[in-house]
């Protein structure tokens, strides 16, 4: 199952749905098997953690995965979320483009 996502690790995204709707953050990790991504400072939960070998116990906040369909690439020039498409450039290489402006990402 080789799924090609239009957003990648390090992309600035905006959340479209859920409790964090409208929040922006960078993608920390993409989980292709579950179609989810972990975004910094989005979908935070409190987790009660037992003390481990190197880690203290207590209540820690961590980011949980959010479904890819609830994320949109954030274009800082337009200051809004945009859809992403693929095009072939002159060399025949596949590139990501902004569907609204046609600009290369």
Image (spheres, helix red, strand yellow):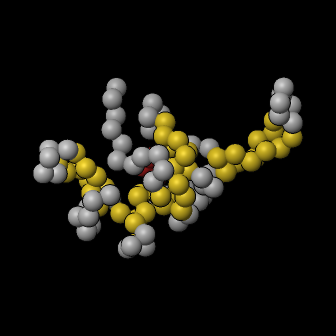
Side of 34 where 58 appears, left or right: right
Q: From the viewer's side, name the closer residue of 57 and 47.
A: 57
Asked whether the viewer can see residue 21, the reply is no
Asked whether the viewer can see residue 58, the reply is yes
**Residue at left 35%, top 63%?**
82
**Residue at left 79%, top 44%?**
60
Image location (x, y in percent) of residue 8: 42, 46
Q: From the viewer's side, name the closer residue of 79 and 91.
A: 91
- Give the residue furthest to the bottom: 78
Q: Is residue 10 above or below residue 16?
A: above
**Residue at left 74%, top 48%?**
61
Side of 51 where 80 appears, left or right: left
Give the total number of marks visible in the rendering: 0
Image location (x, y in percent) of residue 26: 53, 54
Q: Quadrant of the N terminus?
A: top left
Image location (x, y in percent) of residue 80: 42, 70
- Quadrant of residue 18 within the rendered picture: bottom right
Side of 90 where 10 appears, left or right: right
Q: Is residue 73 above or below residue 77?
A: above
Q: Quadrant of the C terminus?
A: bottom left
**Residue at left 47%, top 46%?**
9
Q: Is residue 105 above or below residue 92?
A: below
- Give the residue furthest to the front: 91
């Amino acid at each position: 199952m080789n799924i090609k996502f239009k957003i990648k690790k390090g992309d600035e995204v905006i959340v479209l749905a859920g409790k964090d709707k409208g929040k922006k953050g960078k993608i920390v990790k993409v989980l292709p098997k579950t179609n989810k991504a972990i975004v910094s400072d989005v979908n935070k939960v409190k987790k009660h953690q037992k003390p481990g070998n190197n880690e203290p116990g207590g209540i820690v906040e961590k980011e949980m995965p959010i479904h890819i369909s609830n994320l949109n690439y954030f274009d800082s020039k337009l200051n809004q979320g945009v859809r992403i498409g693929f095009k072939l450039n002159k060399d025949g290489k596949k590139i990501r483009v902004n569907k609204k402006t046609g600009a290369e990402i």
